[in-house]
Image: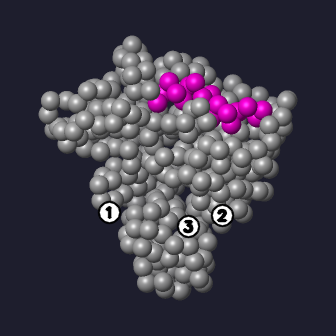
Amino acid sequence: MRSSWRGKSLVEVPTILIVALSGRALAAAAKRAGHRVVAADLFGDTDLKSAADDCVTVDGDLAGGFDPETLLSAADLLAPEASPPRFGLVYGAGLEAQSDLLERLCRGRRLYGNPPQTVARLKDPGEFFGALGRLGLPHPELRFAPPESGKDWLVKGVGGSGGAHVQPFAGFRASPASYYQRIAPGRPIGVSFLADGRRSLPIGCNEQWHATGGGTLLFRFGGVLQPAPIGDRLRRDVQALLDAIVAEFGLVGLNSLDVMDNGDSYAVLEVNPRPGANLDIFDRDNGVGLFAHHIAACDGRLPDSWAPPSMATAMAIVYADRPSRVPADMDWPEWVADRPAAGAHFAEGAPVCTVLAADETATNVRRLTMERVSQVLSILQADKPQSQFKSGPQPAMADANHA
């Protein structure tokens, strides 16, 4: 990855505490950037343990997030509060609906990311979409009372992530922690970007898809790939669009913007104010990686430019399609990340691992990714030995190689 830099060197930081529902991608990226890493997440996967100098598995679930006291105890064990702070804090997915918990985590630690009040503003639909309206930015129609007709409307949970909080509106009144949004036409596109509080630097666009077989979870996150073709209007507007949002909310570090792109129009859906799946598809192990740029951007420094990966890259979540167990003799191939331990059991619909892929074209990488999802599921279903995986050279992403 080629990048140029305003300044002589990247900022030096202390040991980094990673907090995320799944901490592997952030921990591996921080390790590649040369940091000492400690981590707290829900899974404690084997490659997280390889990337981190120490890690703790905490209580919680994907729907409700972290158990606050368990997480705070883990953070105190891994990275004790101090004045001045001796540890940095970088968070990923899982705290969008727990800004109070994030504020407690920040005490006595140096935060490299958006502060809790920014997360709270972005995840308050009235505040976020109200700001978009004032800025003149396109977004779907929003309501807090049920619409007269259920057609073309969604119900979304406030502060949700991963798509499990999104449901088609079926004429019922949702919980007070929900809102109603008209369905916007087009393709779901993510725009990853760095921000210094005033300006943005686009990193790249990715296409998103939903996982199949989720029962009532029709919008559950399935995976992403880059590069993604985008419509002429979004291409023309993307820099001004990002700059306006960054300036309004004071965003810093690595973020992503979700939009529905309809070619000659687009609609802003949300901002994810933290690193996420963009690390798996945009980060590389050569040159200055995205984690180092995230740290520096939080201190107000953006690179002059960013060159995307030379190949098309993708990642997808493997969800168990039936009650499953990881074989005792499992030897995960290099293109699997978030690797559960041998013998781990999974209920139907639970996330098992992540598959990564790289290829010459977006079409090829999407096909390869889906093939790898199927391969993992076939091993889990029949409890077959690892020899059932296809042999031969198969390009993988940096996180799988370095975790």
Q: Residue at x 50, y 36 (%)?
A: 97
Mark 3 vs mark 2, CA separation in Å: 10 Å
Disc 1/disc 3 C-alpha distance (Å): 21 Å
Percent across and percent down for residue 382 are 43, 84
Q: Residues within 10 Å of mark 1 (few under 14, many from 20)?
A: some
Please tell me whether residue 395 belongs to the stretch shown in magenta.
no
Quadrant assignment for the C terminus: bottom right
Q: How many numbered discs sit on the rendered protein?
A: 3
Percent coordinates x, y for residue 119 in the rendering: 54, 29
Magenta region, residue range? 102-123
Q: Which residue is mark 3?
A: 336
Does residue 106 lie above or below 206 as drawn? Answer: above
Residue 96 placement (x, y as % from top left): 52, 37
- Residue, disc 1: 213
| 281 vs 91: above or below | below
Q: Earlier in the sequence, mark 1 or mark 3?
A: 1
Which mark is first along the chain, 2 or 3?
2
Q: Nearer the viewer, mark 3 or mark 2?
A: 2
Helix, strand or loop for disc 2? helix
Q: Quadrant of residue 364?
A: bottom left
Q: Give the mark toward the camera: 1 or 3.
A: 1
Whether tag 3 and tag 2 are in contact, CB under 8 A, the answer is no
Give the CA distance from mark 2 to mark 1: 27 Å
Q: Is residue 111 magenta?
A: yes
Residue at disc 3, secondary structure: strand
Q: Mark 2 highlights which residue?
A: 47
Q: Amino acid at mark 3?
A: Val
Give the amino acid at mark 1: Gly
